[in-house]
Image (cartoon, helix red, strand yellow):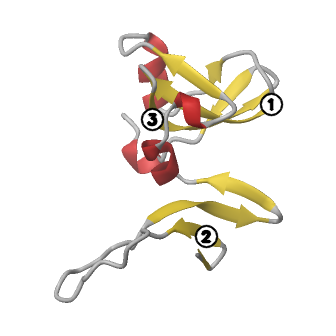
Amino acid sequence: MVFNGRLFQLPPVQLETEGIGVIRHGVELGEVRKGNFKPSHGLAMILNGSNVNQAVDFEFDDPKVQAYLRGETIEHAGENGWVLITVNGFGLGWGKRVNGRVKNHYPRGLRIV
């Protein structure tokens, strides 16, 4: 379903939600901006490295994980474009690689300050 330029994956079965405050009915996959797709953080949280074309996987104790969670850019060679940042294979968030640098797209409100 597309709503205000945002793409959502709805559950295959319609759930009974009467009397329940529903924030989102489904998962936001991303947003279409000027013909380009920007993946959502919610999508990153349900994926793993095997679900995407490009992923950057770190071990849990790698200092780059903390740097990513602080909102820093990470040096990592590879093809330009969106990459899923994973920790031990589990999705953590998105980055956009441009010329060997992964620009951070971790939500500002979740960053470590």
Which residue occupies 44% across, 45% down?
A: 46
Dot 1 or dot 3: first in sequence order is 1
Residues at marks 1 and 3, CA–CA distance in whole angstroms = 19 Å
Coordinates of residue 97 in the picture (x, y in percent): 73, 30
Dot 2 or dot 1: first in sequence order is 2
Residue 92 circle label: 3
Dot 2 or dot 3: first in sequence order is 2
**Which residue is denoted by mark 2 in the rendering?**
6
Residue 80 circle label: 1
Residue 61 drawn above or below residue 9: above
Coordinates of residue 38 in the picture (x, y in percent): 67, 54
Residue 108 drawn above or below residue 102: below
Residues at marks 2 and 1, CA–CA distance in whole angstroms = 23 Å
Q: Which structural element holds mark 2?
A: strand
Find the residue positioned furthest to the front.
13
Residue 93 drawn above or below residue 42: above
Q: Categorize mark 1 by other alpha carbons within 10 Å: few (<14), some (14-19), many (20+).
A: some
**Badge 2 vs badge 1, beta-carbon distance below 8 Å:** no
The three-letter code of the residue at mark 2 reads Arg
Q: Which structural element holds mark 3?
A: strand
